[in-house]
Image: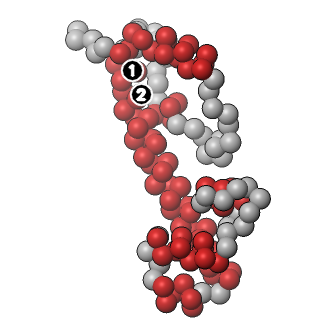
């Protein structure tokens, strides 16, 4: 498992998963214990990578669903000629997980810009 995935699995970026960690991850993902012990190391790595990609895909789908809700709310407040928001506008791009968190000032500016959208128009 690569460093980024090990980091997401609770390890720091410099540590590799131990065999116990790999076993626990496989069991938690529903891999039968006897299958785990029958796998060769390359097969195990391939299985772990496939499990991680499946998990990443599910997380992306959930993030896009939340982005869809956010885009619908934002677009309902859009003025004529205003920007049209898409679900992807509210979701980080793949591989962008290392970007920095917003500062308190950036959050305050965003909250100020979003203030008119807090109530739903009824026209």
Question: Mark 2 — residue?
Answer: 71
Q: Residues within 10 Å of mark 2 (few under 14, many from 20)?
A: many
Residue drawn at x 40%, y 35% is 68
Relative to 39, say whether 82 is above or below.
above
Q: How many numbered callouts?
A: 2
Please provide percent x and percent y for residue 65.
40, 41
| Residue sitting nearer the eye, 78 or 13 | 13
Please provide percent x and percent y for residue 7.
66, 56
Residue 98 is marked as: none
Marks 1/2 in contact by CB < 8 Å: the verdict is yes
Question: Mark 1 — residue?
Answer: 75
Relative to 61, say whether 89 is above or below.
above
Residue drawn at x 50%, y 59% is 55
- Would you say 34 lies left or right of 47 here? left
SS at circle 2: helix
| Residue sitting nearer the eye, 78 or 58 | 58
SS at circle 1: helix
Residue drawn at x 46%, y 42% is 63
Please provide percent x and percent y for residue 30.
43, 74
The image quarter containing residue 5 is bottom right
Classify the position of the N terminus by image quarter: bottom right
Residue drawn at x 62%, y 27% is 102
């Amino acid at each position: 498992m690569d460093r980024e995935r090990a980091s997401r699995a609770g390890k720091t970026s410099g540590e590799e998963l131990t065999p116990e960690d790999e076993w626990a991850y496989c069991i938690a993902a529903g891999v039968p214990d006897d299958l785990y012990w029958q796998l060769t190391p390359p097969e195990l790595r391939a299985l772990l990578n496939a499990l991680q990609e499946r998990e990443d895909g599910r997380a992306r789908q959930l993030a896009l669903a939340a982005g869809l809700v956010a885009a619908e709310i934002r677009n309902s407040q859009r003025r004529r000629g205003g920007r049209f928001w898409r679900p992807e506008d509210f979701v980080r791009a793949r591989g962008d997980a290392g970007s920095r968190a917003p500062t308190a000032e950036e959050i305050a500016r965003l909250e100020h810009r979003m203030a008119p959208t807090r109530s739903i128009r009824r026209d």
